Image (tube, helix red, strand yellow):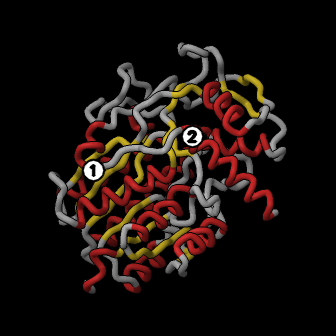
């Protein structure tokens, strides 16, 4: 390993929503980065945005992480000691309809990364997990000790399976791993140079809100108003993407600086506050002085009623906490949408 390889991080899915923001925060924290993506749900817009924000080129390879040979060449070509693995399909609804697509992609890509880390003696990995591993839980907020319930989507199940693969790999090798279970990432960088840019029809709520507000989408569908919640819509823990990116930097730093207490650790990454879909829609309208065209649609298969995090462990152990307000986050999401429309 080269001397600076300890401070160099491979970021898979680096052109995506969370990956691009994490590249910025890693560089801000003094790390070197290598990004890999195959643009299956992104393009180079955010990579260019990252380069504008940090003022330099990002080492990047256009590779599918399921392509073992291409990934092996990457490991041979670059010196890095740590990996943050974002690369995965992530649409809950689609995963229910196309489970094999999700199992093949999300698990194969992760197996390839771990096998190559073992083969080339790379030390640390942060796995992009999800609150979906908790399934439909009875006790809120969820802590890291909350039992994982059977996943209600193939997407959620791939996250559970990959957590188990990581746990077993760490137990039998020199690799150290942290699984970050995050809740609902939203928003954009304050510069409005990077944000969430899904291909085609968005699967996530906030890009659908912003695209409806800008006239790209005719109407926003709120899936269900008959859930057992105060206003009948689902409750989620919405976390600003910049806050989330900083949690990944804290997790990598923990392992690089040998501060981890176990070789495999799990942390919830959220705000600790539940907000309903209808509350979020209303807040977006208020913050940005807009009126949204929305309708109530039938419930969507794979959606849990309510989930939000207890983030005490991450606050204490990672020295991290969510800082940006929901109002600021929704303002940044709209600013990003306007920037994207201005480029069209």
Which label belongs to residue 92? Answer: 2
Left or right side of 216 for 203 = left
Quarter in which the N terminus is drawn? bottom left
Image quarter hosting the C terminus: bottom right
Question: Residue 107 at what x, y percent from top left?
Answer: 43, 55
Name the residue tied to disc 1: 318
Considering the numbered disc 1 on the image, is that residue within a helix, a strand or a loop?
helix
Q: Which quarter of the figure has residue 227?
A: top right
**Is 29 left, or right, of 280 in this rendering?**
left
User: Mark 1 to mark 2: distance in Å?
Assistant: 29 Å
Labels 1 & 2 near each other (Cβ < 8 A) = no
Task: Give x and y (percent) for residue 287.
Answer: 67, 36
- Front one among 130 and 278: 278
Q: Is residue 154 at all visible to an observer of this figure?
A: no
Indicate the position of residue 194 as horizontal and vertical percent values: 61, 61
Whichever of callouts 1 and 2 sits on the residue coming sooner in the sequence is 2
Going by the image, does 171 lie left or right of 242? left
Mark sitting on residue 31: none
Inspect this view and state whether residue 37 appears: yes
Q: Residue at x 57, y 43 (%)?
A: 328
| Residue at 44% in and 30% down | 273
For mark 2, does the 10 Å Cα neighbourhood hold few (<14), some (14 to 19), or many (20 or more) residues?
many
Circle 1 packing at 10 Å, graded few (<14), some (14-19), many (20+), is many
At 48% from the left and 28% from the top, the residue drawn is 274
Q: Which quadrant of the view contains residue 288? A: top right
Foreground: disc 1 or disc 2? 1
* Mark 2 secondary-structure assignment: helix
């Amino acid at each position: 390993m080269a001397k600076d390889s300890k401070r160099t991080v491979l970021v898979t899915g680096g052109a995506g929503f969370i990956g691009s923001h994490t590249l910025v925060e890693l560089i801000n924290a003094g790390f070197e980065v290598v990004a890999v993506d195959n643009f299956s749900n992104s393009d180079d817009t955010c990579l260019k945005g990252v380069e504008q924000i940090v003022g330099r080129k990002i080492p990047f390879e256009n590779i599918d992480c399921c392509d073992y040979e291409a990934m092996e060449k990457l490991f041979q070509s670059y010196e890095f000691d740590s990996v943050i693995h974002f690369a995965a399909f992530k649409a809950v609804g689609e995963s229910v309809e196309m489970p094999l697509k999700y199992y093949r992609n999300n698990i194969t890509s992760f197996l390839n990364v771990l096998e190559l880390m073992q083969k080339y003696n790379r030390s640390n990995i942060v796995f992009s997990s999800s609150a979906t591993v908790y399934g439909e839980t009875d006790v809120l907020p969820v802590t890291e000790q909350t039992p994982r319930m059977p996943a209600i989507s193939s997407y959620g199940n791939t996250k559970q399976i990959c957590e188990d693969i990581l746990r077993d790999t760490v137990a039998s090798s020199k690799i150290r791993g942290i699984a970050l279970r995050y809740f609902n990432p939203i928003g954009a960088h304050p510069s409005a140079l990077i944000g969430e840019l899904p291909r085609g029809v968005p699967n996530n709520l906030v890009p659908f809100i912003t695209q409806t507000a800008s006239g790209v989408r005719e109407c926003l569908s709120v899936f269900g108003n008959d859930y057992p919640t105060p206003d009948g819509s689902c409750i989620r823990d919405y976390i600003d993407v910049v806050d989330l990116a900083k949690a990944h930097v804290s997790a990598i730093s923990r392992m690089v600086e040998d501060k981890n207490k176990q070789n495999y650790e799990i942390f919830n990454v959220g705000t600790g506050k539940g907000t309903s879909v209808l509350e979020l829609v209303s807040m977006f309208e208020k913050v940005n002085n807009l009126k949204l065209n929305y309708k109530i649609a039938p419930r969507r298969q794979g959606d849990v009623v309510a989930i939000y995090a207890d983030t005490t462990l991450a606050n204490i152990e990672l020295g991290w906490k969510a800082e940006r307000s929901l109002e600021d986050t929704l303002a940044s999401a709209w600013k990003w949408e306007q920037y994207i429309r201005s480029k069209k």
